[in-house]
Amino acid sequence: MIKPKAVADGNMGNIIAKIIEGGFNIKALKYTRLTEGDAMKFYAVHKERPFYNDLVKFMTSGPIIAAVLEKDNAVEAYRNFIGATNPADAEEGTIRKLYGTSIEANAVHGSDSDENAQIESNFYFSEREMF
Ligand code: CMP
């Protein structure tokens, strides 16, 4: 996902271009906005965390881009590519370093396992929307 602040800042094109340059194949792409219920469900694994309510509020604050990406070892490759969760700790040249402004508004989300990648892909896309 490209998060609301990165979209609002006008960086969705730059981020998608960088993802393609990074060798990721775009299998599915969607411009949409999460309802409160959607965001609560998407981030349900974090529901006990102190930042959950703010995260849900932020993620519903504007449109986002959802995408499914393909690459060898895609989950790990993408996590390395985007950088640390907190942009302040992310390496130079990573998406979060370039476009993230806080730990919450860290520009993009990436799945943390193949299993969650499958769940999160199915959250946004039907079979016929993935190529
Ligand atoms: P994301 O990859 O979308 O997965 C969960 C999100 O929770 C994470 O990126 C951050 O934006 C957010 N998050 C994680 N830890 C914190 C924290 N300590 N404070 C606020 N937000 C956090």
Image (cartoon, helix red, strand yellow):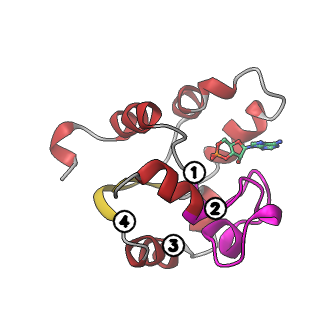
Q: Which residue is mark 3?
A: 15
What numbered label is drawn on residue 109?
1
Q: Is residue 96 above or below residue 45?
A: below
Q: CA distance from mark 3 to mark 2?
A: 9 Å
At label 4, the amino acid type is Phe
Percent x, y of residue 80: 58, 60
Taking the spot 74% from the left edge, 65% from the top edge, the residue there is 90
In this picture, which residue range is highlighted in magenta?
81-109
| Name of the residue lying farthest toward the front | 73
At label 3, the amino acid type is Ile
Q: Which residue is mark 4?
A: 24
- Are the residues flagged by discs 3 and 2 in contact, CB closer than 8 Å? yes
At label 1, the amino acid type is His
What numbered label is drawn on residue 107?
2
**Marks 2, 4: nearer the viewer:** 4
For ligand 1, give the image quadrant: top right
Main secondary-structure element of the magenta-colored stretch: loop
On the picture, is 3 further left or further right than 88? left
Taking the spot 62% from the left edge, 25% from the top edge, the residue there is 45
Q: Is residue 64 above or below residue 59?
A: below
Q: Is residue 63 visible?
A: no
- SS at mark 4 in the image: loop
Q: Of callouts 2 and 4, which one flags the residue occurring earlier in the amino acid sequence?
A: 4
Percent x, y of residue 96: 67, 65
Q: Of callouts 3 and 2, which one flags the residue occurring earlier in the amino acid sequence?
A: 3
Respond yes or no on whether mark 1 lies under 8 Å from ligand 1. yes
At label 2, the amino acid type is Ala
Percent x, y of residue 35: 53, 36
| Name of the residue lying farthest toward the top | 48
Q: In this orientation, which residue lies closer to the viewer: 119 or 32?
A: 119
Q: In this orientation, which residue lies closer to the viewer: 30 or 74?
A: 74
